[in-house]
Image (cartoon, rainbow, N blue to C red):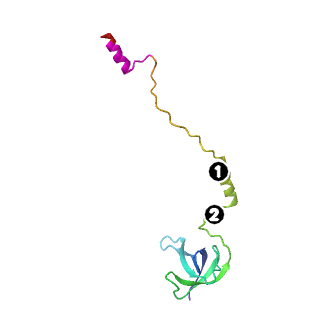
Amino acid sequence: MRSKTGIVLSNANDKTIVVRVDREVRHPIYKKNYRVSKKFHAHDEKNEAEVGDVVAISESKPISKMKSWKLDKIISKNAKVVDLPAAVESESEKEAKESIAKEKIEPARIEPKKEEKAVPENAETPESSSEIEKENS
């Protein structure tokens, strides 16, 4: 039987865990190693695996549409899951973000002013020029 080792991503379903298994592959042309991951649904009869645990799973007969693996053993408890941003962020980064957030003050609202044309006091407007013409005639 095949067996794989991975990290538990989810245990939300009853008697089912989702395990991420990583493997390294060498690119055939560029000869660079890169990581490939795949998710497997595995049967956890006692609901004992938690998110972040490193587990060993083995192949079994199909249990349901998605599950054809079963939990063998829990290798280590509470490993950090890399996909969750909260697990990656350190305490100093959290404190720095909080202090920056406190320093930021909401900018005051500036209401746009109505546009007024600057007209000198002595300048003639079209209304006043028509009035002057009427007076002259």
Residue at x-position 61% and y-position 84% = 45
What kind of residue is marked 1?
Ala
In the rendered view of the protein, which quadrant contains the N terminus? bottom right
Residue at x-position 57% and y-position 81% = 42
What kind of residue is marked 2?
Ala
The furthest residue to the left: 137
> 39 or 4: nearer the eye?
39
> 81 or 29: nearer the eye?
81
Left or right of residue 63, residue 55 in this image: right
Instruction: Identify the disc placed on residue 62.
Output: none
The furthest residue to the top: 136
Instruction: Please identify the quarter of the rendering in which residue 37 is found.
Output: bottom right
Q: Which segment did they paint magenta?
A: 122-134
Instruction: Please identify the quarter of the rendering in which residue 75 is found.
Output: bottom right
Question: Which residue position holds label 1?
Answer: 101
Q: Secondary structure at mark 2?
A: helix
Tell me which secondary structure the magenta stretch mostly adopts. helix
Task: List x then y, in percent, for residue 35.
Answer: 55, 72
Instruction: Identify the disc placed on residue 86.
Output: 2
